Image: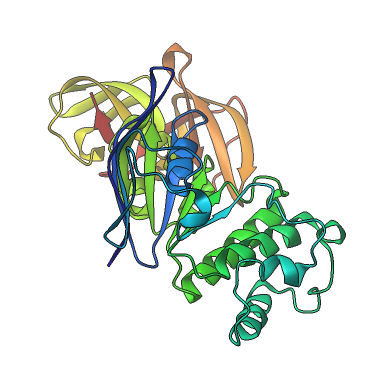
Amino acid sequence: MVSLQIRNLSHAYDGNAALSGINLSVEQGEIVCLLGASGCGKTTLLKLIAGLMAVQDGEILVEGTLLAADGTNPPPEKRPIGLVFQEGALFPHMTVAQNVGFGISNSEESESILTDLFEHIGLNGFQHRYPHTLSGGQQQRVALARAIAPSPKVLLLDEPFAAVDIVLRRRLREQTRRLLIERNVTAILVTHDPDEAMEMADRIAVIENGKIVQFGSPDELYNNPASLNVGKLLGEGQAVNSIIHDDKIITSFGDWPISVLKSTDLSGKTTLLCNPGNFDISKGGDCEVIDIRLKAGVRRVLVRGKELDTLWIDLKDDYVPTTSEKVTISPAAESAIAFE
């Protein structure tokens, strides 16, 4: 079942387009990330869904029922939508239990709902604490539980992990995704962090200049990016200028066989998208090693070709070149994508 549907949604600020013809469908229980740079329109889209801004053009539907359109804009409290902000925004005068239970009616089920949520977020024993006595990560977990407690049809998360340190951020991502899946919550997460999108999302909508340029699973976007920008954003892709001529590819890092391309329907000047992990490196050649770094347990080498072009290469074997050493780099078969 489609939980949230956005049809032809556009929005402008003082005549300047922020969103242009957005179409998006989110399935029940699906976690979708809106990914893009600051100012691309992702937060504007979130605010329109939440009711923090009025829809100017287009429609928003929840479970097939019209929620908002031009002239139909119910306030946030009248929408079946939950919202978690970057800072959590807890009520400082309320205990943890009172914060989480704020949106639940005093029913017989409320106590069991709260008990279940506290178990899931790992805050049993914190019910009578006040927000100022909690760490940043604990406060965000309380904010998440408060948003989920009323069982919203859609949960919106506006960069909810941005204010915590990177180690805690990874743990919160895992806990949050597990909680959303276990409770079958439909969620939309706004982020500018590609790693967060890849770890959290079932599908990712990449937004550029107010438009969705690609929407698909992390695997789809990583392996088959629709543009050079998407590939660089999600796959650590690197741009390599090249000329495809007959059966070879001419680059500043050497001539490569045409077999390194996933698709061979281009010719002439092109830009290749190459991943650091898709190369072999060997002694001797025209490329020069200018730096060596360790990233996520992988030794990464920066090589320089002709015309001062550079490229990062992940080492796969025992051979570790030294700085200033001359090497040859070879892409794996069908590992590079060519863009005009």
Q: Is residue 159 above or below residue 305?
A: below
- Quarter residue 193 falls in: top right
Residue at (38%, 40%) from the top-left corner? 206
Foreground pick, 13 / 176: 13
Numbered circles on residues, count: 0
Q: Is residue 225 visible?
A: no
In the picture, measured across the screen, residue 144 lies left or right of residue 73, that is right
In the picture, measured across the screen, residue 297 lies left or right of residue 94, that is left
Q: Is residue 276 above or below residue 165?
A: above
Foreground pick, 48 / 220: 48
Q: Is residue 230 visible?
A: yes
In the picture, measured across the screen, residue 131 lies left or right of residue 11, that is right
In the picture, measured across the screen, residue 56 lies left or right of residue 300, that is left
Foreground pick, 333 / 88: 88
Residue at (79%, 63%) from the top-left corner? 94
**Residue 153 drawn at (x, y percent):** 43, 64
**Residue 37 drawn at (x, y percent):** 49, 32
Image quadrant holding the C terminus, namely top left
**Residue 318 drawn at (x, y percent):** 55, 51
Residue at (27%, 67%) from the top-left corner? 1
Foreground pick, 81 / 138: 81
Q: Is residue 179 above or below residue 85?
A: below
